[in-house]
Amino acid sequence: MRFLLRAALVLLALVGGTAAGAADFGALVAALPAGSYSDRAKVVDDLAQSGDPRALAVLNALAADDLKVMPDGTVVIVDDKGAAKAAVDGTDKGTPAADQLDRVKVNNAVRRAVRTAIGVLTLRDPDPAKRLAAAREALRAADPDQIDAVDSALAAETDPAVKALLAEARAAAVLKSDAPAADQLAAIKLLAARGDDAAIAALAPLAGAQNPEIAQAVKSALASIAETQRLWGLAQNVWFGLSLGSVLLLAAVGLAITFGVMGVINMAHGELVMLGAYSTFAVQQVIRLHAPGLFDWSLVIAAPVAFVVAGAVGVAIERGIVRHLYGRPLETLLATWGVSLILQQAVRTIFGPDNREVGNPGWMSGAFTLGQLQITWNRLWILIFALAVFAVLLAVLKRTPIGLQMRAVTQNRAMAANMGIRTGRVDALTFGLGAGIAGLAGVALSQIDNVSPNLGQGYIVDSFMVVVFGGAGNIWGTLAGAFSLGVANKFLEPFAGAVLGKILILVGIILFIQKRPRGLFAVKGRSVEA
Amino acid sequence: MLIDRRLGIFLAGLFVLVVVVPAGNLWLAGQPVPTYLVALIGKYLCYALLAVALDLVWGFCGILSLGHGAFFALGGYAMGMYLMREIGDRGVYANPTLPDFMVFIGWKQLPWYWWGFDHFWFAASMVLLVPGALAFVFGWFTFRSRVAGVYLSIITQAMTYALMLAFFRNEMGFGGNNGLTDFKDVLGYDLGGGGTKVGLMVLSAVALAAGLLLARAITVSRLGKVLVCLRDAESRTRFLGYRVEHYKLFIFTVSAMMAGVAGALYVPQVGIINPSEFSPANSIEIVIWVALGGRGTLVGAALGAILVALAKTLLTGWLPEVWLFALGAMFVLVTIGLPTGVLGALEGGLARTRRAPEPAEREA
């Protein structure tokens, strides 16, 4: 950009012999203090059209009320220390006393002109991000007077994203101008392809245009935009649903092991998730105190810690309590509920009853847009994490010796014992694996939920629903259950509201279990009734 | 035998309570039984009735309902709605037709489901009908499709959870978060008065006794034998030609109605009913009452409820942070170490010291 401008200036200097551009610029600046407000606005427009690189500083100063006139009529820019520099060529004018300077006054009309002019000038900024922002602003303002400026920027633009946006900004401006119908129709077509709220804002005023062809085109363009937006809205719902589904999957996949595979009802599952979240908190505390530089790695460090903490508690629960209650599922349910109460109160006693602050590392915060989708990084990472945990779990169960033993013991305990598998140890490890995964879920949930002693309570009913819906004993069923419940929930929300949507889902699952008591993907065969 | 020794002793104890407490509160000089204690005892008796209701389905039919709190709360809400209507224009907004909370959220007229609650008889029948109907419909679907065991437990929990979420909504018209409260009087008696509290407590005791007798009558009948039979071997009972789901449905519905009555008596004594009564944690606490007292003993369930509620009152007063530890430990220790509950252990102990066979023990 700068190079082009400089080349243009050099060219001008060569052709005109004198620096005609510079002279124009000087004249324009000198004309600024003169005349009425409307004259001033006109000069501001001309400054913008001049495309002179110095104009931006002058206009910024004008907007900030820093543009003053010396007694000799020189226009100067005064910085916050009171030092004045000539606006045209930047020569030092010392620090004149404040009462010697006249302000170049602005009113709202001039301010508006200044803002537009700055936008036009920023269209040539060397930074593509700034140009993009300026182009977006130009699209919003859609000022017919800017068409020429946008055109020249468009001709010089190299960045495709900025170029496309500029073309749309130009189209919006064309629509407001009295350009010939053919141009307007082209502009309508371009904006219809954009298909968002900005396009609607630019098109809507023309719906009642006199030219029937244009009115028709605008109408069909608006309809197509509405359709595009509906599709994007659908995509947005799917994304929210997948995001909720990933949270459900994380909360439920550990349960799919303890309840689904082992058949043990572990009501303390939610509390194991909570322990994972508090492990994250503890790791972050240590990092904050001793190695603040590692903060971006805190979740990576917390994951194994949470897995081990929750897994160890899980093994303790299995060896201490659940072991005595195999074959008595209702009693297991009650005893593990007792454990959940104890864990909750223990955490409350140690960490206090209030929410704990768990920070988001840099790579987890912020968002990006995909088309018209707004996607936050933390949700995306949690989705990836949930799928990764699921894949690893599946690999452990299907591809490792310990996974083989786990499946053998749950399918036929006596036979497995006869084959020399230490079933007690395998039980403890399986339960520990499920618990450890709950801990991993806690690491992820600490990023989007309040870390309090009640954290687990919110997930226990949901995660049981997911496992039951998907079909106990089937890990894939849990995956399908989590995502279908998540998406269904988000699609119900716009119609029914968040709470009623959740209630409808619960009622739906209760009815579903009537029809298919063994879940979506029931395990078939003789072992089912056992 | 309808009244065995265990039930006889308990009913006698209840009778003594009904005589001593009112006397101590109303007639004896110096009021040795303060009024708050009367309300507290009344509350415990309601819990006991609720525990008996759960024991009927869990102890005798093997249905571990984690949603009995929902029936209790629904009965409570039915009574609460009547009490709200009793307030009339004495509310804060002095609106003659609408309860305060409806005025507050800007409703103009009474929703249809509040019609009729001006009459006590209507409310009283709803106390039975609403929980009964819910249990019937829920049980109809569930038992027919043979949902059993932990699956049943979990969907009963989902049921009460869904109801809790629903009642938390203001648009439901049941007072939302705050529930129903600020009651003034019941059947014209001032709820703040000591006499009313004693009356309610006595009523609760009578209801508990009636509930125990009804439950006992059911369980010693032929129907009760079938229930125990299907608890222990459901498939075998079905193969013998019994319509298992009908028996389950019957006992589940009766139990829900009993829970509804308990809730209805509970609400005027504590003066409030709100959605937290539906919380799954509350329902599961009922289970520990039964388990601690002794599952399948009826009297044990009632005792367990009173013991745990008493412990809760005392511990949350003295050492609030210890209560959940104690409750949690209770769950763990009772299920592992005390499968027959306190009553079973006591009677077992008595039987051993006397070295005489105890026929009643085998019955459970």
Image (spheres, rainbow, N blue to C red):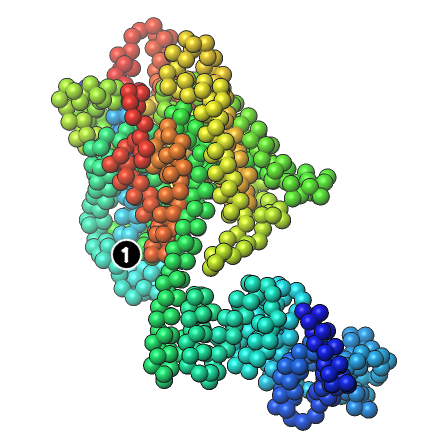
- Residue at point 33% right, 56% down? A495
Q: Is residue A143 visible?
A: yes
The residue positioned 72% from the left and 81% from the top of the image is: A12
Q: Nearer the viewer, residue B158 or A12?
A: A12
Q: Residues within 10 Å of mark 1 (few under 14, many from 20)?
A: many
**B6 sits to left or right of A158:** left
Q: Which residue is mark 1?
A: B85
Q: Position of residue B32 (x, y in %)?
A: 41, 37
| Whole-percent x, y for residue A38 in the image | 61, 90
The answer to whether residue A183 is left or right of residue A97 is left
Residue positioned most to the top: B355
Residue A86 lies, in percent from the top left, at 80, 82
* Displayed quadrant of residue A116: bottom right
Name the residue nearer the viewer: A498 or A80.
A80
Chain hosting mark 1:
B
Task: Report the amino acid beneath label 1.
Answer: Arg
Rendered position, B100 above or below B201: below
Left or right: A439 in relation to B282: right
Residue B321 vertical position relative to residue B358 in the rendered view, above or below: below
In the rendered image, the residue lying farthest to the front is A15
Label 1 secondary element: helix
Answer above or below: position of A53 versus B102.
below
- The residue sitting at 61% across, 38% down in the picture is A300
